[in-house]
Amino acid sequence: MTVVYSILLGLCLSAMAGLRVFVPLLGLSVAVRYCGVQANEAYAWIGGDLAFYTLLAASVVEALAYLIPFVDHLLDVALVWIVPVVGTFLALAVIPEQDPFLEWATAIIAGGGLALGVRATASGLRTVSTATTAGLANPLFSALESLISVIGTILAIVVPLVCALMLVLFFWICVRLWRRLRGRERLQTS
């Protein structure tokens, strides 16, 4: 595994954790089990049977739970604390081992920060959606987030550069959509 691939993989998986916490963890488990991706020695357990089946079940439950309007809000509130930890873990698991300070700083700042940035963007869009559609569009947003997380996780493993470009596009679309929905909200309150 090259250094560039490892870094892009870790960062892209971290970003996908901002949408769904368990999907990129499951993706990493699959990649370690079946695709020859090497996790750092301390994190090799993620490719084991227990981790794989637990993450598979958790991914399905999380995706379904986000389709329930009130539950999606509770998950957003609860996961704001978990997302940066998972993002940091995903970066640490695959970024090549180096000086411990540099390794942890990179994982926390880049991995955890990226995961939290994606989570904040998605939560902001969900808040605007809730305000403008009384929550009726939230299941659509949730399904879209799940789909993006799955596709992004697969791309992160297969072609992480494409995933990184997709991530940039995602932020651009979210910002545009957020501005458009905020504009509608302001018109309705006037």
Image (cartoon, rainbow, N blue to C red):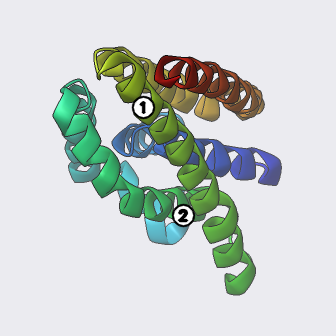
The foreground one among 114 and 123 is: 123
Can you tell which quarter of the image residue 68 is in?
Answer: top left
The residue sitting at 41% across, 41% down in the picture is: 33
The residue sitting at 48% across, 18% down in the picture is: 188
The residue sitting at 75% across, 79% down in the picture is: 102
- In the image, taking residue 21 as reference, residue 59 lies left or right, namely left
**Secondary-structure class at tag 1:** helix
Give the residue at mark 2: 88
The residue sitting at 27% across, 41% down in the picture is: 73
The foreground one among 48 and 155 is: 155
Give the residue at mark 1: 126
Residue 43 image offset from top left, x and y in percent: 45, 64
Q: Few, some or many C-alpha atoms within 10 Å of disc 1 (few <14, some 14-19, many ≥20)?
A: many
Disc on res. 64: none
Can you tell which quarter of the image residue 26 is in?
Answer: top left
Residue 42 image offset from top left, x and y in percent: 47, 72
Q: Nearer the viewer, mark 1 or mark 2?
A: 1
Q: Earlier in the sequence, mark 1 or mark 2?
A: 2
Residue 184 image offset from top left, x and y in percent: 56, 17
The residue type indicated by label 2 comes to: Thr
Q: CA distance from mark 1 to mark 2?
A: 24 Å
**Secondary-structure class at tag 2:** helix
Q: Few, some or many C-alpha atoms within 10 Å of disc 2 (few <14, some 14-19, many ≥20)?
A: many
Q: Tags 1 and 2 in contact by the CB under 8 Å rule?
A: no
Q: Is residue 111 above or below residue 52?
A: below
